[in-house]
Amino acid sequence: MLIVFSGLPGTGKTTLAHALAQRIAAVYLRIDTIEQAIRNAGVLAGDVGASGYQVANQLALANLRLGHTVVADCVNPVSESRQAWAATARSADAALLDIQVICSDTQEHRRRVESRRQRYPWPGAAQLGVGARA
């Protein structure tokens, strides 16, 4: 099964996706982490664009084909990214559960976004002198 948590930053999707992946021992793919690793590698001349989503979809496909449940954590802002997750699930003959996370309290959402800090850094970041975005 492919479970995709989508939503704006500060809605709580990472908290939910991380907790679910941990609880069910699923593969956890966070687009922010993948994109930051690409930036840190310095292999792109410009912005990462859709590369984080492409990497995540390939990792999801490989793990789904191994029989693992995959939890993806992403903003998922455009129809192309949503269609890519659906195609990945179809390619692996896996069920897709698409969860849109929102924070209906606009003041709380603003507070969360404005007070964000790094929560799930990638291993080795401190030793290499680089950081990960929240």
Image: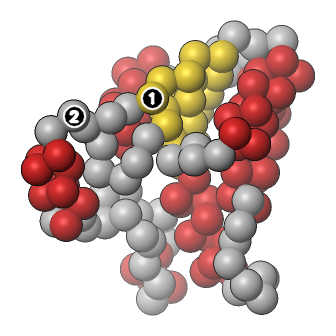
| Left or right placement of residue 52 versus residue 108 in this view | right
Q: Residues within 10 Å of mark 2 (few under 14, many from 20)?
A: few
Quarter the N terminus occupies: top right
Q: Which residue is mark 1?
A: 100
Q: Quadrant of residue 22?
A: top left
Type of the residue with mark 2: Ser
Q: Is residue 9 above or below residue 17?
A: below
* Residue drawn 70% across the image and 51% down it: 53
Q: Nearer the viewer, residue 127 or 55?
A: 55
Which dot, 1 or 2, sits closer to the camera?
2
Q: Residue at x 21, y 34 (%)?
A: 104
Q: Amino acid at mark 1?
A: Gln
Query: What residue is pinned by disc 2?
Result: 104
Q: Position of residue 44 (x, y in %)?
A: 77, 82
Please, which colouring scheme is shown? secondary structure
Image height of 93 relative to 71, above or below: above
Q: Is residue 45 left or right of residue 40?
A: right
Label 2 sits on a secondary structure element that is loop
SS for dot 1:
strand
In the rendering, at what x and y percent does residue 76 appear? 58, 44
The residue under the point 40% across, 48% down is 8
Number of the label disc, if any, that sits on residue 84: none
The number of numbered badges drawn on the structure is 2
Q: Give 82 or 15, whichever is nearer the viewer.
A: 82
